[in-house]
Image: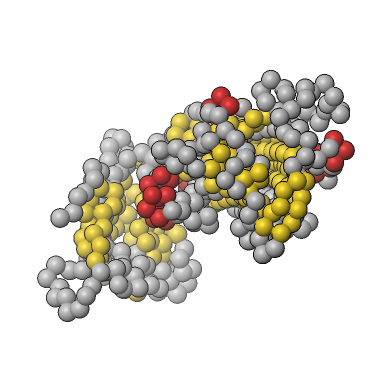
């Protein structure tokens, strides 16, 4: 007996012993021990904000498992996709407004075939010239139902045709463009998903307040350069995805993947809503990235990131990144990676490590590689719902992390930075000893200095390394903004690091 959650549909029993899970037809005799699993997926709905990619080049694509794609075609192979013979059809159920893309095959017979709606009115034309049309070329168009109702788009094939894929973005309104500036309808996640992959250098997107839901879609990529994605407000604009927890991974789950140079995110929230606590219970790992940053010269201003493990992942050796007035939430290594990233006036918020409480969180896991400068936190604040917090731990290579005039704020919960293998920093490395961990005059909310005068600790990983992690004013200055960035000035409202702050208590 299979229990199916509301909004889900049972798709059948699949053979888990095959390399690619295949559906078992009812009545198939089992002649040996066979692992089967019951598959359920969300019921597809032609609603505003939804996005569907039907990959017809996958052998295990089963049309009967889809509510919004109806076809008489059949799988041919992984190169050609589905084959449609003369007289067969492909139907796509869509919302009143949508963008549609069809992946073409160069081996289709030459044709100029009509795409019609349910009323038989022409919507677009799909043209192919055999062995001349580039393989994988897209036939893309926008459609709006004249009565603003759900519709069905139909291709009645007149020649032998192969289709690689069909993709539908159900949108609230057509995307508005004025020069290089795009404006989207509030909460239109489908339009935003589509647009991210089509941006050209220098483009910008304005997002009104709303939730831009990407569903389970991951690695939604911004590859162009000098892009600005500007929201109406940090708390009002939420870009979110929610991948299944079984798909967890630092390189596989990101809400947004940035690979461009000079891109700016401002006044918005990025949320990876993967079910962290269920994942930790069932598989002990729940890596769910909000921003996977393989670019350089990235600026985040008034950006909130909501996740738990590996929330922000800097993943480009030699890259530069700048954060100002941001808020980053997480539990395990929630600021992690390589490159050089400077955080000014940001809030680091440690969530509960376990749903029931207890445990410890690590704010950072540096993977810096010389000459990377790692992470510097300048006048940032730490809050925590977890009782024990580490300023960071050593991941790999030559980890570097520095805190300057950090404030510990207990308003979200009392927390300590000492205990259970933590002496302000995690004593054991993941895959290396730290190159440089440092802290300068950590404060409480009343301005009292609460860091010790000295914190000499011994780190261990395939050996030991002793380090005093408390630094003086002169050494702190070497890590401040003017010395961190050379030839790049990304700050918005940066206030110069104070002169030797003798006025600070303690």
Point out residue 229 in the picture as x, y percentages from the top left corner: 59, 38
Residue at figure coordinates x 21%, y 54% from the top left: 10
Is 299 placed above or below 225 here? above
Residue at figure coordinates x 15%, y 73% from the top left: 28
Count of all numbered marks drawn on residues in the image: 0
Residue at figure coordinates x 24%, y 66% from the top left: 36
Is 310 left or right of 43, judged from the image as shown? right
Residue extending furthest toward the left: 27
Is 397 placed above or below 426 here? below
Identify which residue, 453 or 154, lies in the foreground: 453
Point out residue 396 in the picture as x, y percentages from the top left corner: 66, 59
Residue extending furthest toward the bottom: 31
Identify which residue, 450 or 355, lies in the foreground: 450
Is 157 placed above or below 243 here? below
Residue 411 is at least partly visible in this image: yes
Point out residue 264 in the picture as x, y percentages from the top left corner: 65, 40
Residue at figure coordinates x 60%, y 48% from the top left: 421
Point out residue 245 in the picture as x, y percentages from the top left corner: 40, 51
């Amino acid at each position: 007996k299979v229990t199916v959650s509301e909004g889900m549909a049972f798709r059948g029993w699949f053979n888990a012993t095959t390399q690619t899970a295949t559906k078992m037809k009812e009545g198939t005799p089992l002649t040996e021990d066979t692992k089967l699993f019951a598959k359920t997926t969300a019921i597809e709905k032609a609603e505003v904000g939804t996005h569907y990619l039907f990959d017809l080049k996958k052998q295990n694509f089963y049309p009967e498992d889809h509510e919004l794609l109806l076809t008489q075609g059949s799988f041919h192979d992984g190169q050609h996709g589905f084959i449609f013979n003369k007289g067969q059809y492909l139907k796509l159920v869509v919302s009143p407004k949508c963008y549609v893309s069809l992946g073409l095959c160069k081996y289709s017979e030459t044709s100029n075939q009509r795409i019609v709606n349910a009323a038989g009115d022409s919507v677009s034309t799909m043209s192919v010239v055999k062995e001349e049309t580039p393989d994988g070329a897209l036939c893309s168009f926008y459609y709006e139902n004249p009565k603003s109702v759900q519709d069905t788009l139909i291709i009645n094939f007149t020649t032998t045709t192969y289709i690689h894929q069909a993709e539908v973005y159900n949108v609230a309104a057509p995307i508005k463009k004025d020069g290089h500036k795009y404006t989207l309808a509030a909460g239109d996640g489908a339009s935003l998903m589509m647009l991210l992959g089509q941006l050209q250098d220098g483009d910008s997107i304005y997002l009104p307040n709303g939730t831009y839901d990407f569903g389970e879609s991951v690695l939604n990529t911004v590859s162009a350069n000098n892009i600005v994605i500007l929201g109406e407000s940090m708390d009002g604009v939420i870009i979110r995805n929610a991948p299944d927890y079984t798909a967890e991974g630092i390189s596989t789950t990101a809400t947004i993947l940035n690979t461009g140079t000079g891109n700016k995110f401002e006044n918005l929230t990025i949320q990876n809503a993967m079910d962290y606590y269920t994942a930790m219970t069932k598989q002990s790992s729940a890596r769910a990235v909000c921003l996977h940053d393989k670019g350089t010269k990235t600026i985040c201003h008034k950006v909130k990131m909501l996740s738990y493990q590996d929330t922000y992942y800097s993943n480009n050796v030699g890259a530069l990144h700048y954060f100002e007035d941001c808020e980053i939430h997480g539990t395990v290594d929630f600021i992690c990676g390589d490159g050089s990233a400077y955080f000014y006036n940001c809030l680091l918020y440690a969530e509960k490590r376990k749903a029931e409480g207890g445990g410890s969180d690590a704010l950072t896991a540096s993977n810096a590689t010389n000459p990377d400068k790692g992470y510097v936190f300048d006048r940032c604040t730490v809050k925590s719902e977890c009782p024990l917090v580490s300023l960071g731990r050593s991941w790999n290579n030559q980890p570097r992390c520095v805190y300057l005039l950090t404030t510990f704020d207990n308003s979200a919960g009392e927390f300590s930075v000492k205990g259970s293998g933590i002496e302000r920093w995690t004593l054991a490395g993941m895959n290396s000893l730290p190159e440089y961990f440092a802290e300068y005059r950590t404060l409480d909310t009343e301005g009292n200095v609460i860091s010790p005068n000295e914190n000499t600790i011994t780190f261990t990983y395939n050996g030991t390394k002793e380090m005093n992690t408390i630094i003086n004013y002169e050494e702190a200055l070497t890590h401040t903004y003017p010395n961190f960035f050379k030839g790049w000035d990304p700050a918005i409202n940066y206030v110069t690091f104070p002169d030797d702050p003798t006025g600070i208590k303690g």
